[in-house]
Image (cartoon, helix red, strand yellow):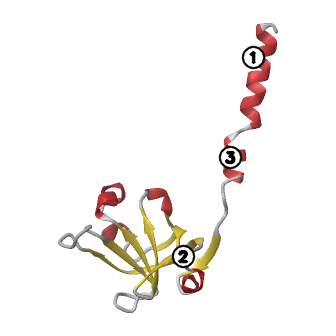
Amino acid sequence: MDIKRWFGIALLSCFALSPSDVIARAPQFKRLTAAEAKDHIGEQATVCGKVASTRYVATTRGKPTFLNLDKPYPSQVFTVLIWGANREKFGNPEEKYRDKQICVTGKITEYRKAPEIVVSDLQSIDVQK
């Protein structure tokens, strides 16, 4: 095979898997309100709501940061949990996300009868405009 033909095939294969194709194939998760999340424990989903309260507990084991959606703690509807080991990826999440409308994607779990998603990377949280 001559070099021009090989180059043409290589170039076409790059376009065959363009970034837009990869994005289009990314998994799409159910989009839920914070209140709906309680009915989807164990599922991967995107949960949206307003951050009503935040708390960084530096003195507790694991140094968790809590982002409580729709209602402030202790009446929160849904919680986003960021463990201290991942905190630096988010800057100061208790300030950055306070009073913002966010969507968080991940596996919905339950802690003390309340739904939550534990996030470990910045791409899991999307601030809505």
x 44%, y 57%: residue: 122
Query: Which residue is tagged 3?
Result: 22
Is the residue marked by circle 2 packed among few (<14), some (14-19), or many (20+) residues within 10 Å?
Answer: many
- Front residue of 70/9: it is 9
Picture quarter containing residue 73?
Answer: bottom left
Indicate the amino acid at tag 1. Phe
Q: Which mark is residue 7?
A: 1
Q: Residue furthest bottom?
A: 75
Amino acid type at circle 2 is Cys
Helix, strand or loop at mark 2: strand
Classify 50 as above or below 123: below
Asked whether the beta carbons under mark 1 and mark 2 sit within 8 Å of each other, the answer is no
- The CA span between labels 3 and 1 is 23 Å
Whether residue 6 sits left or right of residue 69 in the image: it is right
What residue occupies the far top of the structure in this picture? Answer: 2
Using a 10 Å C-alpha cutoff, classify the residue at mark 3 as few (fewer than 14 neighbours), some (14 to 19) or many (20 or more).
few
First-in-chain label (3 vs 1): 1
Q: Position of residue 21 (x, y in %)?
A: 72, 46
User: What label does residue 48 carry, if any?
Assistant: 2
